[in-house]
Image (cartoon, rainbow, N blue to C red):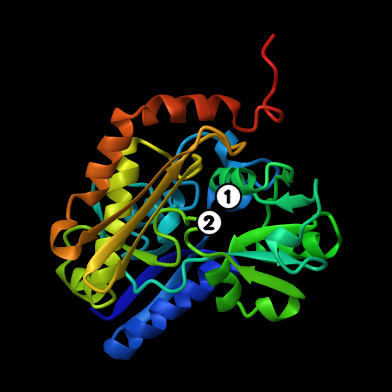
Amino acid sequence: MKKLTIATRVSDLALWQAYHIKERIETSYPEIEVVLNKIVSNGDKVLDKPLALIGGKGHFTKELEDEMLAGNAELAVHSLKDVPTYIPDGLELIAVTQRQDQSDVFLSHNFATLDDLPQGAVVGTTSLRRRMQLLQQRPDLHVKDLRGNVNTRLRKLKEGQYDAIILAWIGLNRLDLLKDIPYTQKLSLDMMIPPMGQAALGIEIVSGNATVKEIAQTLNDENTFTCTQIERDFISKIGAGCSAPVACNAVIEADNVVFRTMIGFPDGTNIMQEKVIKSISESENLGEELAQKMIANGALQLLQDAEKIAFKDEMPQRL
């Protein structure tokens, strides 16, 4: 194989991720030329409304997958949190890179911590997961939708449109943007449970190409793959899309897997929460097992009811 084409989105963070993988492949396989096929995804085009209102799944992955299926790329680099649990026929999610810091981070130009925000402060996030957890802890806050790329979101914060915003720490760190924000507070995993796959990259390939599969597998981190598979199994079993008010996170501590989950209403009420610790050797089905337990306790109805009230103020009224 002389040339390998990587499909990637065109956002700053996506390109950082794609160039990172390109460099790793070229280091391991210097005889292969690696090029990027830069694609604008649907999620990058629709910036005037929350993704939860658009419907469907794979807002940041479908166009990349279409390019691979059309023969225009052999491999795609995704933020794993954006990858639906269903992978189209002809493609495989073959590797997951070593996960970095998974925390969400509080950002403000005027307040040092989440607890320092005054009553009624305006906090920006589009994530129903973050909205749910913020309002569970601070029901007095006004949570306002926040779309756009990372730089756009930071500009809106600086302009004073928000008292604070919540973003993933890893993206800001990779783009070296944290230094420009006066106040930052990394939120603990118990304080703000991340989404499935946060801070890991998913490597998706076209099925049937043994060379590409071998290359992709060199990028895999076994512990991260184990943890993120538990998260993906949970999401798949519970039937939640990437925009639903669901949080789930598995981490390895010593010889155990610690798995945290939460579902509820976007307004921070009706919360169902679990934290389970199991040995790594017994954790293979942990995601499905915990999903089944929560389903038995009413999780599916809870999610259905949560969907009805999500962004209700922004949905057109039916006549």
Of badges 2 and 1, nearer the viewer stands: 2
Question: Which labelled disc corresponds to residue 141?
Answer: none
Question: Which labelled disc corresponds to residue 130?
Answer: 1
Q: Check disc 1 and report its element: helix, strand or loop.
A: helix
> With respect to residue 239, does 16 lie above or below?
below
Amino acid on which disc 2 is placed? Met
Are the residues tagged 2 and 1 within 8 Å (C-beta)? yes
Q: Position of residue 152 (x, y in %)?
A: 73, 61
In the rendered image, which quarter contains the N terminus? bottom left
Distance from the alpha carbon under mark 2 to that under mark 1:
7 Å
Question: Which labelled disc corresponds to residue 192?
Answer: 2
> With respect to residue 222, does 248 lie above or below?
above
Quick one: 289 or 94, which is closer to the camera?
A: 289
- Sequence-wise first label, 2 or 1: 1
Mark 1 Cα-neighbour bin, 10 Å: few <14, some 14–19, many ≥20:
many
In the rendered image, which quarter contains the C terminus? top right
> With respect to residue 4, does 133 lie above or below?
above
Left or right, 167 with reference to 110:
left
Left or right, 211 with reference to 83:
left
Q: Position of residue 170 (x, y in %)?
A: 53, 71
